Image: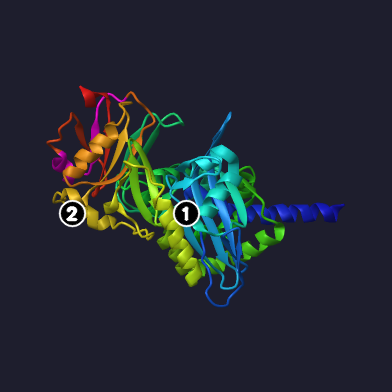
Amino acid sequence: MRQRRKSKRSYTRVKWILGIMLTVLVAVAGSMMAGHHKDGGGSVDIEDGLVKNDRITHVMILGVDSRVGDVGRSDTMMVAAVDLDKEKAALLSVPRDTRVQIEGNDYEKINHAYAYGGHKMSRSAVEKLLGTKIDHYIIINTKAFERIIDALDGVDINVEKRMYYEDPWDDDGGLVIDLYPGEQHMDGKKAIQYVRYRDGEGDIGRIGRQQKFVKAVLSKVISPAVLPRLPKLVEEVNSAIQTDMSLSELVEFAGLLKEVHNNGLSAKMVPGQPAYIKDVSYWIPDITDLRELMAEQLGLELSEETKEKAQADEDAYMKTLPQGMQLLAQSKSNGKVVEEDGEKQENDVKPMKPQEISVMVINDSGINGAAAEVAEILQRKGFVISGVETGKTSSREQTTITTSTRNTDVFYGMPFACVIMDGGSSNQAVVHIGLDYRK
């Protein structure tokens, strides 16, 4: 009996120690993915039109913000792919606004899939997007993120710029993000501000910060300093994750963490471009670039057959875009996330040109189509629109434009009432549309 209990405790310890790593990765965001072989290095099969490589293990990771009486949505989505032979891994972030076809429904944002059918529906949507078979899933309760970081005794991060944002309508009773640039040790409260911060870059900038944070957490998790804190970590993670991974798979992955760190963790995002229709924003994936990126990250090469399928998938996808959808080609991303140079931003004082400033437009007025109208006005003035969306409230009184001090003058002369505020990032701005837009 004692031996059986010891075995059970060992299983639990191994499971949750690995879970610590994977939980933090998902809660922050970032995602891993792999590619397809052309010659050798594992067998490649096609199952139901999806590529399956026996050397690569794909794990879909979902960060879910669930509430009482509400299954929630996958606020963070990633696919973890590990090359077991080469002991390499890659991170790919899937923007939550990615437009995909959800089984039994029309084309919608990929984070809606979880609300419709849990991890099974999300898995189906991700497989269709990537053209790759998903082997396992991990679901994380993102509300546990802050506690887990505290249990790790925090993480060291170099904050790349001034980050200030207030959202009194946030679901958790209001959100205030207030961070200054520079190297600093972050506890759970500060860490969640860093990974949630979003300005004119939209999800592209946030994904870059999340991936940067993932790498910092990986360094912390594999360090000897974490060993005395394992009991508390196990306690916090125990209630935070669900997974279908077996003990042997968990043990194998746990043994790879140090080598994955030493070999370098590749971190990218789904390539594509933002788009909007009316006041709803989407991320339109570049499917051919996505499949190429998947292969490139782990040093693999796509076969000609796979390239042809990717092109056919992309052609079919683009035909489904509804009439009136505006593609923002100026904000197109190739999947590479570039870290910002905070020191350079601090030294720049001259106003930037409109075409150098990315603007996120958020409709907080409840006025139908207001965000799309403002986005078109800004585009005509030369600004780059990174996204258009409906806010969490419809009762904001005043329209505001928040940008850096150096760029406030650039926004004067708008053909609508607005308050121009400083406090934003150097090359971004956020427009919140209020009820005064129609007055």
Q: What element carries label 2?
A: loop
Instruction: Look at the image and tell me whether residue 267 can be seen.
Output: no
Q: Which of 224 and 205 is in front in this view?
A: 205
Please report whichever mark, 1 or 2, sits nearer to the chain's N-terminal start. 1
**Residue corresponding to mark 1:** 30
What residue is rendered at 37% in x and 29% in y? 168
Q: In this view, does 285 lie above or below 240?
A: below
Chain part drawn in magenta: 396-411
Which three-letter amino acid code belongs to the residue tagged 1?
A: Gly
Q: Where is residue 132 in the image (x, y as percent from the top left)?
A: 55, 59
What residue is rendered at 51% in x and 61% in y? 33
Instruction: Look at the image and tell me whether residue 148 can be seen.
Output: yes
Colouring style: rainbow
Q: Where is residue 11 in the image (x, y as percent from the top left)?
A: 73, 55
Q: Is mark 1 on a helix, strand or loop?
A: loop
Which three-letter amino acid code belongs to the residue tagged 2?
A: Asp
Marks 1/2: CA–CA distance: 30 Å
Q: Residue furthest bottom?
A: 40
